């Protein structure tokens, strides 16, 4: 996903408009598209902040600290099933996660799932 333009650039674009420059010149001067600079100007006129919007999606249920706890649970009892890990996460960390979420988290942590004999 592309990164949002910095606040420094946004301030320069809005400052160019404050100087009375037309949209075409503002876009050329700041090396941005005309449509983006026009939309930024419109946002300011509507009273909205010039700051970039928050990225879509939501924060993961298991943050870094909870992932470390999950890794400790697996290290403590490596033969636990996903359902057992899920119950322990709910009981000790207070977070209800699905089996799929737990599976993906363990995969991201590169923890073993299948046990060798």
Image (cartoon, rainbow, N blue to C red):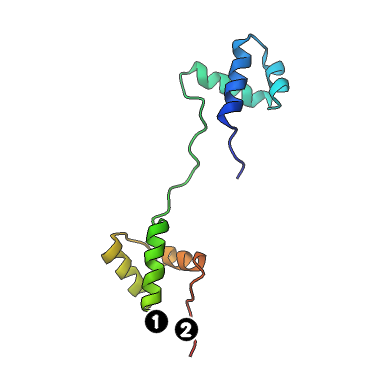
Numbered mark located on residue 31 in the image: none
- Image quadrant assignment for residue 31: top right
| x, y percent for residue 50 | 51, 25
Image mark count: 2
14 sits left or right of 64 in the view: right
Report the residue marked by disc 2. 115
Q: Would you call the spot at circle 1 few (<14 residues within 10 Å), some (14-19), or many (20 or more)?
A: some
Q: Residue at x 71, y 16 (%)?
A: 25
* Residue contact between numbered discs 2 and 1, judged by CB atoms under 8 Å: yes
The quarter of the picture where the N terminus appears is: top right
| x, y percent for residue 33 | 68, 27
Q: Residue at x 48, y 38 (%)?
A: 54
Is residue 82 at all visible to an observer of this figure? no
| x, y percent for residue 99 | 40, 67
Furthest residue toward bottom: 117
Report the residue marked by disc 1. 79
| x, y percent for residue 76 | 36, 77
40 sits left or right of 47 in the view: right
């Amino acid at each position: 996903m592309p990164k949002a333009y910095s606040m420094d650039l946004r301030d320069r674009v809005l400052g160019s408009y404050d100087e009375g420059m037309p949209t075409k010149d503002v876009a050329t001067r700041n090396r941005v598209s005309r449509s983006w600079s026009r939309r930024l100007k419109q946002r300011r006129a509507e009273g909205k902040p010039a700051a970039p919007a928050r990225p879509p999606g939501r924060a993961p249920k298991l943050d870094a600290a909870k992932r470390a706890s999950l890794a400790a649970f697996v290290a403590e009892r490596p033969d636990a099933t996903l359902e057992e890990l899920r119950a322990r996460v709910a009981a000790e960390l207070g977070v209800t996660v699905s089996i799929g979420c737990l599976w993906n988290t363990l995969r991201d942590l590169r923890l073993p799932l299948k046990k060798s004999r």
